[in-house]
Amino acid sequence: MSDKAQKPLIPAATILMLRDGAEGLEVFMVVRHHQIDFASGALVFPGGKLAPGDVLPEVRPLCDGADDLDDSLLALRVAAIREAFEESGVLLARDESGALIDGKRLSSLEADRPRLDKGELPIAEFLTREKLRLACDLLEPYAHWVTPKMMPKRFDTHFYLAIAPSDHVAMHDGSEGVDSVWINPAQALEEAKAGKRTVIFPTRMNLEQLAESKTVAEAFEAAQARTIVTVEPQVEDRDGTMMLTIPAAAGYSVTEITMDSI
């Protein structure tokens, strides 16, 4: 049996929620619970695997920006917005007026976060009940990473940028995420280098890329100008030194790194 057959890829979506802070660009990140089996204790962007309800036909009519997306790409954006709501409390959705919901409306939906997370409330049922539409058109594709073959669990993860509505209060869920922070990307990298934060390799690479932008507008402009190249890190044995390599075409600051330095 092949590696791929043994370890199937799990479709997933991650969202980099951005805002302009007093010291420049900030991104919302959460600290994953130590008992979670992937990236436990790490500082990560909100995200997770697709839920069965994300791919149902009845979801498409409840999404803005769906016309230009096939079913698989639309499902990833649905998952990204749903996960952002579950893990950060920010919901990119429009009401019947066509405007993004405000903070007051958002607070009335707080009890639905754990129900969505546990799969007790399908996203289509939630949106229909509340007369909402997901603002899938507000997500900007940012990166695409595939977990290396040697890992026990493999994800096929699409990263998206989004702007956090100013009156939405982002807060970790207390379950998967045990802490949260709005942080400048460069500061997050500095704290990881100093040993104050645990940041896994894909997160670090995307933080480095994000740190090249000083504002939300710059980050979006850079993402729109960049061609997204799928990154599936490869492991090579070079005279006894195990190296992790990624495609140079992906545009990250490094193309190879020793495994013991990750």
Image (cartoon, helix red, strand yellow):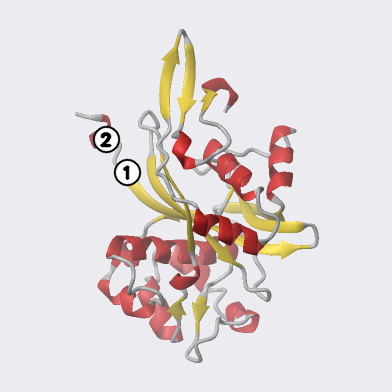
- Residue 103 seen from this side: yes
Q: Is residue 197 above or below residue 92?
A: above
Residue at the far right: name it: 22
Q: Nearer the viewer, residue 69 or 9?
A: 69
Q: Is residue 230 above or below residue 45?
A: above
x%, y% of residue 118?
Answer: 43, 62
- The kind of residue tagged 2 is Lys
Q: Mark 1 points at which residue?
A: 9
Question: Which image quadrant: the N terminus?
Answer: top left
Q: Using the numbered discs, state the Cα–Cα distance from disc 2 to disc 1 in whole angstroms.
A: 7 Å
- The kind of residue tagged 1 is Leu
x%, y% of residue 132?
Answer: 45, 83
Question: Which image quadrant: the C terminus?
Answer: top right
- First along the sequence among labels 2 and 1: 2
x%, y% of residue 139?
Answer: 49, 65
- Residue 37 seen from this side: no
- In the rendered structure, find residue 215 and report the number of the disc placed on it: none
Residue at screen point 68% across, 74% down: 166
x%, y% of residue 84?
Answer: 53, 63
Secondary structure beneath label 1: strand
Q: Name the residue under label 2.
A: 4
Number of other residues with Cα within 10 Å of mark 1, as a class: few under 14, some 14 to 19, many 20 or more: some
Residue at screen point 58% across, 36% down: 253
